[in-house]
Amino acid sequence: MKRITILLLLMITGLAWGQEEYFGQNKVQYKNLDWYYIQTRNFNIYFNHGQDSIANFAAKTLEDAYRIVSEQLDHKITQRIPVIIYSSPNDFQQTNVISDIMPEGVGGFTEVFKNRMVIPFTGSYEDFRHVLHHELTHAVMFNLLYGNDISSLLARQAIFSPPLWLAEGFAEYSSRK
């Protein structure tokens, strides 16, 4: 009887989540992107056709930043971190990595579940360097806190999720020169 009650509660909760709807807001993808990738020791970097120089800059920047962040957190990752680079903020707004509409002013994000970093190139290499380092700090922090597999992530995130001021504050501190 107890199992049936728990099962019913879970089903009702699931139905409640299914009712959430964003009326009149559709994420439109205006063009098909031609993806390529390069692999470094710690990263798989995905980028659009013709953006080789940006991808190479990101590869060097990320490997340099990884040495700093892993030393600061005293933690080494065991799997390559996927990094998706969009060639412009407009392309970034159309990402299907997350289903939500991207809020204005988002300079990049790190997805918690698959630990993917998603970043647009805005035209400024210094801003790009900063956002790469910032998001890498989140990726290493998530790996430290939650591990690599989805089951440990769900269990640990239910128990502990760092306060936003701590996660963002440390990422900003780490990414400043």
Image (cartoon, helix red, strand yellow):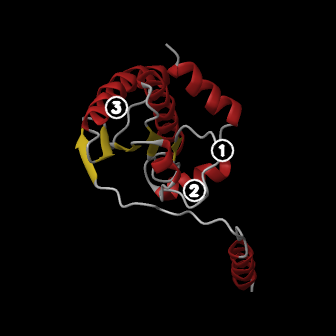
N-terminal of the pair, mark 2 or mark 3, is 3
Q: Is residue 30 above or below residue 14?
A: above
Residue that protrudes farthest toward the top in the picture: 177
Q: Is residue 7 left or right of residue 50?
A: right
Amino acid at the residue labelled 2: Leu
- Quickly name the residue at label 1: 160
Element class at badge 2: helix
Asked whether 122 or 118 is in front, the reply is 122
Amino acid at the residue labelled 1: Phe
Mark in front: 2 vs 3: 3
- Quickly name the residue at label 2: 154
N-terminal of the pair, mark 3 or mark 1, is 3
Query: At which x and y percent is residue 140?
Result: 46, 35
Q: Is residue 130 above or below residue 140?
A: above
Query: At which x and y percent is residue 162?
Result: 66, 38
Amino acid at the residue labelled 3: Ala
- Residue visible at 41% across and 20% down? 68
Mark 3: give few (<14), some (14-19) or many (20+) Cα within 10 Å: many
Q: How far apart are labels 3 and 1 at the CA level? A: 31 Å
- Quickly name the residue at label 3: 58
